Image: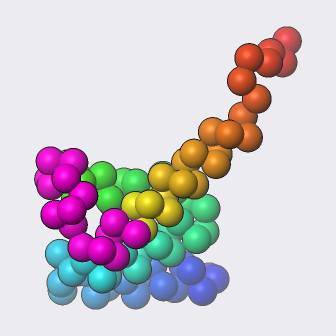
Amino acid sequence: MGKTDKCILWADKILHLKPKDPALIALKTGAFEDEGRVDDAETVLLPLIRKAGGNLSQLSVSIRDVWGQVTRADIAACEIIPHGSRSD
């Protein structure tokens, strides 16, 4: 088990006690993003964003920062996919 996996495991243990702690949520989702697990980070963050009605200003700065990192990772992933090219 790598350091990122240990970080996520500890964050999960603490989130069990404090499930709405924005710093812990940011820690966990930031670890997912650092590991390239953007889908996992989105799975955690999107319900929070929906609950805020899409108004990111209602979320903590740490959550907004991680969301920014996740969306940049999504954009970067899309940019490496060649558009209009066919493999057949």
Q: Quadrant of the N terminus?
A: bottom right
Q: Residue at x 55, y 60 (%)?
A: 37
Which residue is at a point 48% across and 85% down the rendered structure image?
Answer: 7
The quarter of the displayed image where residue 8 is located: bottom left
88 or 66, which is in the foreground? 66
Please name the predominant secondary structure of the magenta segment in the image. Answer: helix
Horizontal arrangement in the rendering, residue 77 relative to residue 38 (left or right): right
Residue in the image at 64% along x and 48% along y: 76
Q: Residue 25: in sight, yes or no?
A: no
Question: In the displayed structure, would residue 80 be above or below residue 34?
Answer: above
Assess whether residue 26 is covered by the magenta stretch.
Answer: no
Residue 65 lies, with reference to residue 52, above or below; the image says: below
Q: Position of residue 27 (x, y in %)?
A: 40, 80
Quadrant location, the C terminus:
top right
Give left or right: position of 31 versus 53: right
Q: Please say whether residue 52 is one of the residues in the magenta stretch.
A: yes
Nearest to the observer: residue 43 or residue 26: 26
**Relative to residue 78, is residue 23 depicted above or below?**
below
Residue at 30% x, 82% y is 23
Q: How is the image coloured?
A: rainbow
Task: Name the residue furthest top.
Answer: 88
Q: Which residues are magenta?
A: 51-65
Query: Would you place residue 54 above or below residue 65 in this image?
Result: above
Res. 66 image quadrant: bottom left
Given the current orientation, which residue lies at the most extreme front position? 57
> Percent from the top left, x then y, of residue 82?
76, 29
Where is residue 35? Give x, y as percent. 60, 69
Q: Is residue 64 visible?
A: yes
